[in-house]
Amino acid sequence: MSKLNFLCSWLLLLTGCGQATDEMALTPVSGTIEYQGEPIQEGVIRLVPEKGSAAPVRTTQINAGSYQFTDRSAVKPGTYQVEINAYQGQAGLPGDQPAGSSTSRKQYLPEQFNTKSTIEPLTIPPDSDPVQHDFNLK
């Protein structure tokens, strides 16, 4: 065995096989979202990591009052600011309809639930089991 092969083998032994810790550390998060006692039928929930965190922002749809961050959209451990938008009007993405159209989709939640969120931050502990967290917005 050459010195180079021996050195490479030794380095592999020292570093180990490694693990995909990023994927293994993801936690599924799901729950329900209500506004004034009624399930939000269509919307978006966004989890924004606290400053200094390496975790990515996570966004998923709200359908019939439920949301879920699973598989690749699952959440890394950390603390997240929660932003929720809910939409009324014709199906489709906001802005798809002509401006001023009475059938345009509109976001109807007050800014305290989205752009200036005062929702209590969501904390995902390391090595957590799946998290069930419901939001009852008033």
Image (cartoon, grey):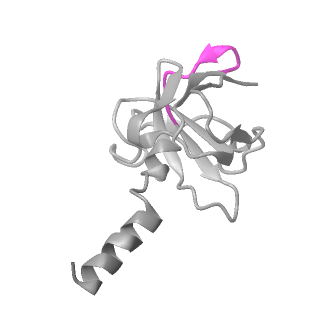
Q: Residue at x 42, y 56 (%)?
A: 18
Q: Which residues are magenta?
A: 35-44
Q: Residue 55: horizontal and vertical position, in percent?
A: 57, 56
Q: Residue 29: horizontal and vertical position, in percent?
A: 55, 31
| Rendered image quadrant of residue 103 | top left
Q: Which residue is at the far front?
A: 1
- Taking the magenta stretch, the answer to whether it contains residue 118 is no
Q: Residue 30: horizontal and vertical position, in percent?
A: 55, 26
Q: From the viewer's perspective, tell me whether residue 42 is left or right of residue 4.
A: right
Q: Which residue is at the far bottom?
A: 3
Q: Is residue 20 visible?
A: yes
Where is 5 relative to 26, above or below? below
Q: Residue 126: horizontal and vertical position, in percent?
A: 65, 42
Taking depth in this image into account, of 112 and 17 the one nearest to the observer is 17
Q: Which residue is at the far top?
A: 37
Taking depth in this image into account, of 5 and 97 the one nearest to the observer is 5
Q: Is residue 101 visible?
A: no
Q: Residue at x 75, y 38 (%)?
A: 119
Taking depth in this image into account, of 13 and 75 the one nearest to the observer is 13
Q: From the viewer's perspective, tell me whether residue 31 is left or right of residue 18.
A: right
